[in-house]
Image: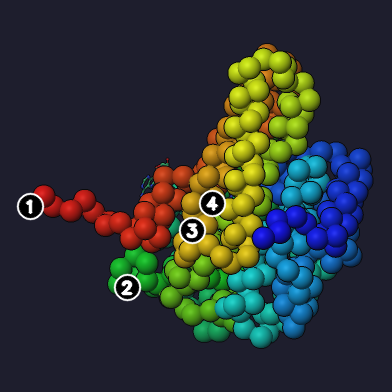
Amino acid sequence: MDFSWTSDQVELRARARKVAEEAVDRYGRANDSWINGFSREFSRELAAHGWIGMTWPVEFGGGGRPPIERLIVAEEMISAGAPLAASWFADRQMGPTLMTYGSPEQVGELLPRILSGETTWCIGMSEPEAGSDLAALKTRAERDGDDFVINGQKIWTSFGEVADYCYLICRTSTEGPPHAGISEIVVPMDTPGIEVRPIKDMTTNRHFCEVFYTDVRVPATNLVGVEGAAFKQTMRQLEHERGGIDRLVSNRALYLTALARADRRDPIVRQEIARLETGYRLGRLLVTREVLGQGPTGFSAATKCFCTEHEWDVAQFVARVLGPEATLWDPLVQGLTYAPGYTIMGGTSNVMRNILGERTLGLPREPSPRT
Ligand SMILES: Cc1cc2nc3c(=O)[nH]c(=O)nc-3n(C[C@H](O)[C@H](O)[C@H](O)COP(=O)(O)OP(=O)(O)OC[C@H]3O[C@@H](n4cnc5c(N)ncnc54)[C@H](O)[C@@H]3O)c2cc1C
């Protein structure tokens, strides 16, 4: 078996690296650049290279390229710290979700503007009382003639302040068990009744927002998929979110900064580097298997768990190598203090382990009674 990259892949990587480095020169280097590096201008540049929707089928306007090519481009972009955030959510999950569940009108209207890098999307999923337990969500969309009228509150909505559209997960019925009655609706963020309150976190980032919906009226045709039966759609969407290279490489730039300064004669430092390099390679194999569609069902939870815990280990290494210096330079402090988020966003590691145990390994949900 040949594990080496093809000459086309090597050439693509070199091209992506050059574009990423030029972007960093122009826009600065962002830590965790797929969520913290925001530039609409760079989104349009990515689109011009064919690097948004590059794996989407050609009939949807995508590039029809193999998933491994997207992995290569994204790895280079995020490792360098190039600002991907304005198009990342839409490229990673809104587009694929709309291709699977959207109406022909939604596909025709929304996908071209994602592919051209014009639109930014946010995801309205979490609520103050519904994070890991998403089925507890209360934001309500009620049918009124040809419209839905939405009331409720979301929290941790990344890019709520700047997004053009929200992919909203809400409740259209309170009948039946909590997982029933959940629907997905596309909400233009300029609709009257939406109030966005940005949250500046301790790392100085402000992508998080609280979003309040008061009598927000959107056409019923904005419903994606089946009314009241979207829980499965949402779980499918989260699969797009969990097994990708962005979960491994977020703080690679920080690692490379620390690596250049690490005392490699110190045996403990050498051990740590060996462990992290091994972890990175293992993570990349897991991600590669995901993007090639070769992982068992639900295994993206394990990939997300392993890769984000690697990112946490990287942050610990950076803090140890740089010591007090890490507190003197803003980008380092920012990168380090952001690290607890890796194993929370997109589903916490505890929840990932539950999914792995129950869905992939088939373990019992409750401990068996002793006999
Ligand atoms: C950087 C970042 C970006 C985010 N962006 C978005 C976004 O754009 N849109 C959006 O909707 N949300 C977003 N989130 C929110 C994220 O999805 C939630 O924080 C996450 O799902 C956890 O929910 P919670 O914060 O309510 O914690 P909780 O669900 O309250 O969990 C608290 C603790 O309890 C544990 N726990 C909970 N349930 C179980 C269980 N069944 N078994 C074992 N342990 C359990 C958890 O592991 C955790 O340790 C973002 C979060 C972060 C950190």
Alpha-carbon span between mark 1 and mark 4 = 36 Å
User: Circle 3 is placed at which residue position?
Assistant: 299
Among numbered discs 3 and 2, the one appearing first in the sequence: 2
Closest to the observer, 62 or 299: 299
**Residue type at mark 1?**
Thr
The percent coordinates of residue 242 (x first, y second) are 56, 55
Name the residue type under label 2.
Glu
Q: Is residue 255 visible?
A: yes
Q: Which residue: 60% across, 47% down?
A: 283
Residue 322 drawn at (x, y percent) = 70, 19
- The reply to whether discs 3 and 2 touch (Cβ–Cβ < 8 Å) is no
The amino acid sitting under disc 3 is: Phe
Cα–Cα gap, marks 2 and 1 = 37 Å
Q: Quadrant of the N terminus?
A: bottom right
Q: Secondary structure at mark 4?
A: helix
Residue 52 image-quadrant placement: bottom right
Marking on residue 175: 2
Residue 166 position, x and y percent, is: 63, 63
Q: Residue at x 92, y 46 (%)?
A: 22
| Left or right of residue 95, residue 227 in this image | left
The reply to whether callout 3 and callout 4 are in contact (CB within 8 Å) is: yes
**Amino acid type, residue under disc 4 in the picture:** Thr
Mark sitting earlier along the chain (2/1): 2
The correct choice, above or below, for 273 with respect to 139 in the image is above
View extreme (left): residue: 371
Between the C-alphas of marks 2 and 4, the distance is: 35 Å
The vertical placement of 234 against 159, above or below, is below
Q: Which mark is residue 104?
A: none
Secondary structure found at label 1: loop
Secondary structure at badge 2 equals: loop
